[in-house]
Amino acid sequence: MNVIIAGATGDIGKAIAKALSSEHNLLLLYRDEAKRKILERDLKATNIQFFSIKDLFQKSESVLSEFTTFSPDAFINAIGDGFYAKVEETTLEIIDASYEANFKVPFYLTQIVYKVFLNQKRGYIIFINSVSGLEGFPYGVAYCSFKFALRGLAEVMYKEGKRYGIKVSTVYPGIVKTRLLQKMPFLPKEKDLLPPEEVAKAVKYLLNLHPTAEVKDLVLKNKELSWR
Ligand SMILES: NC(=O)c1ccc[n+]([C@@H]2O[C@H](COP(=O)([O-])OP(=O)(O)OC[C@H]3O[C@@H](n4cnc5c(N)ncnc54)[C@H](OP(=O)(O)O)[C@@H]3O)[C@@H](O)[C@H]2O)c1
C-alpha cells in the first residue's frame, strides 16, 4: 500500500511510520527540516519519501500534485497539539492556535487527499483523534472542542465518502506517552500511559482488515488511570 502520514515527526506519527515502514511505501509530511532529518535517520528505511508542508496554506496546488503522483491508498492524520487552560483563562489566541493545529491543518490536508481519493474512486482516511473528541475534560476548552470538531469532520467524510468508495475511520486514544504530555496541567502515573506503539498497532489493524470489514471508530482507552 502507499500510505501518507501527516504528523510523522510527532511521537504517535513516528510510531505509526515505524510500524508501517516494513510493509508499505510511505510519504511522510513534515514542516521542520531538522525534525525530518532525525526522522529519516531513525526510520532507516528505503521505501520512504518526505514532503514539506511548511507554508501549507500557500501551496495547495503543489500538495495536490504531490499526493496525486504518490497515488495513496491510505492517509493517516496524526497532526495535533495540546492546549490546556481553564474556561475563564482560555484566550482567543489559545483558541486560534488549537483550531489551527487540531482542526484547520488536518481539515486542509484531508480535503486535498479526499480529492485524490475521489478521482481514484478509492482510498482510506484514518484520523488519530483522542478520547477528548468523545468527552469533555477540565482544562479542555480549546483541546476538546476542536477534537469534537474533528470527529464531526470524520462523521461527514465517512457518510459522503461511502458513496465514492472512500473509507473513513477514527482512532480515539486515551493518554499516550508522548512529548504532548509536557503541556498537560496534571498527569497520570507513568505506568498507566499507553505507549505510542499501541496506537500504531491499532492503525495497522485497521489497514489489514478484510475489504468486506469496517471498523469506523476504535476507542483505545487506558485500562487504569491513577494520578500523581
Ligand atoms: N499524547 C496523547 O496523550 C494523545 C492522546 C490522544 C490523542 N493524541 C493526538 O494524537 C496526535 C499526535 O499527538 P502526539 O502525542 O504524537 O504529539 P506530538 O509528538 O507533539 O506530535 C504532533 C505532531 O503534529 C504536528 N503539528 C502540531 N501542530 C501542527 C501545525 N499547526 N501544523 C502542522 N503540524 C503540526 C507536529 O509537528 P512538529 O513535529 O513539526 O511540531 C507533530 O508532527 C495529536 O492529534 C494528538 O492530539 C495524543
Image (cartoon, helix red, strand yellow):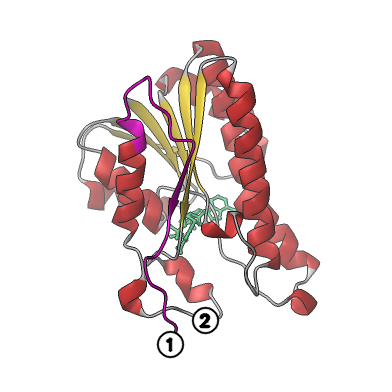
For the residue labelled by badge 2, is the local secondary structure a helix, a strand or a loop? loop
Point out the stretch of residues depicted in magenta: 206-228
Q: Is residue 197 above or below residue 225?
A: above
Q: Residue at x 49, y 19 (%)?
A: 68
210 within the magenta span: yes
Location of the N terminus (image quadrant): top left
State the quadrant of the C terminus: bottom left
Q: Is residue 62 left or right of residue 220?
A: right
Q: The residue under label 2 is which amino acid type? A: Phe
Q: Residue at x 47, y 75 (%)?
A: 182
* Residue 186, numbered circle: 2
Residue matched to label 1: 228
Mark 2 CB within 8 Å of ligand 1: no
- Labels 2 and 1 touching (C-beta < 8 A): yes
Looking at numbered disc 1 in the image, what kind of residue is underneath it? Arg
Tell me what residue is drawn at x 62 percent, y 36 percent: 155
